[in-house]
Amino acid sequence: MPTLYLLCGLPGSGKTTLALQLEREHRALRLCPDEWMEPLYGVNIPETELDAHRAPVENVQWDIATRALQLGLNVVLENGFWSRAERDDFRRRGVALGADVELRYLDVSREELWDRLSRRNKNLPRHTFPITKTNLDAWWALFEPPGPEELGP
């Protein structure tokens, strides 16, 4: 039975590092929306348009993930899964395809996130975008951390 790994956390929490580890250890297809944004839309996407560009990428990646799960392959999604509703939706989707679903939450303090993002902003890795303190503060307010009932034993 394939496993769908949902990586939950804000930028700088370590989602890509964990995703790369899961990809290696579980021979999983890793899908990261950020890695598709630049090749599809370029590097200068206005901040106000990021969500409009990201949604179609995530939709196409889900189509690919669906097929991979149907073929019995493990899949890692690095979407961030900021809301309970989104996490519940993707859990249902995975189960409907006959997959096990594992939520991996990267719980990092706001101070540590900003420290990591500040360092990353100075030498941006490929396919990443600079993130300001204002961005992080706004996203922190929107983020719904998973409760114990979502994380299981």
Image (spheres, rainbow, N blue to C red):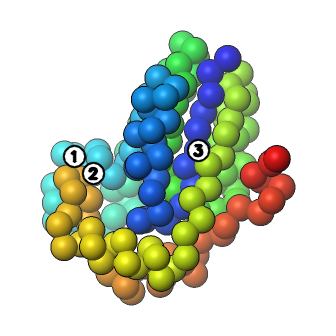
Task: Judge by depth and name the residue closer to the eye, 53 or 141.
Answer: 141
| Mark seen at residue 149 | none
Residue drawn where x is 40% and y is 49% of the image: 16
User: Label 1 sits on what residue type?
Assistant: Leu
Among the 4 quarters of the image, the one containing residue 96: top right
| Mark seen at residue 37 | 2
Residue drawn where x is 77% and y is 53% of the image: 150
Q: Quadrant of the N terminus?
A: top right
Seen in the picture, residue 102 relative to 145 is either above or below; the reply is above
Seen in the picture, residue 100 relative to 132 is either above or below; the reply is above
| Mark seen at residue 6 | 3
**Disc 2 vs disc 1: Cβ atoms closer than 8 Å?**
yes
User: Label 3 sits on what residue type?
Assistant: Leu
Lower position in the chain sequence, tag 1 or tag 3: 3
Query: Is residue 81 in view from this perspective?
Result: no
User: Image check: 41 left or right of 94?
Assistant: left
Query: Where is residue 7 drawn, in percent x and y?
Result: 55, 49
Query: Where is residue 140 drawn, in percent x and y?
Result: 54, 78
Seen in the picture, residue 91 relative to 98 is either above or below; the reply is below
User: Label 2 sits on what residue type?
Assistant: Met
User: Image check: 75 left or right of 122?
Assistant: right
Query: Where is residue 62 drawn, in percent x and y?
Result: 49, 36
Q: Tag 1's secondary structure?
A: helix
For the residues marked 2 and 3, what is the alpha-carbon distance in whole angstroms? 19 Å
Count every numbered label the image shows and give the total. Answer: 3
User: Image check: 59 left or right of 3?
Assistant: left
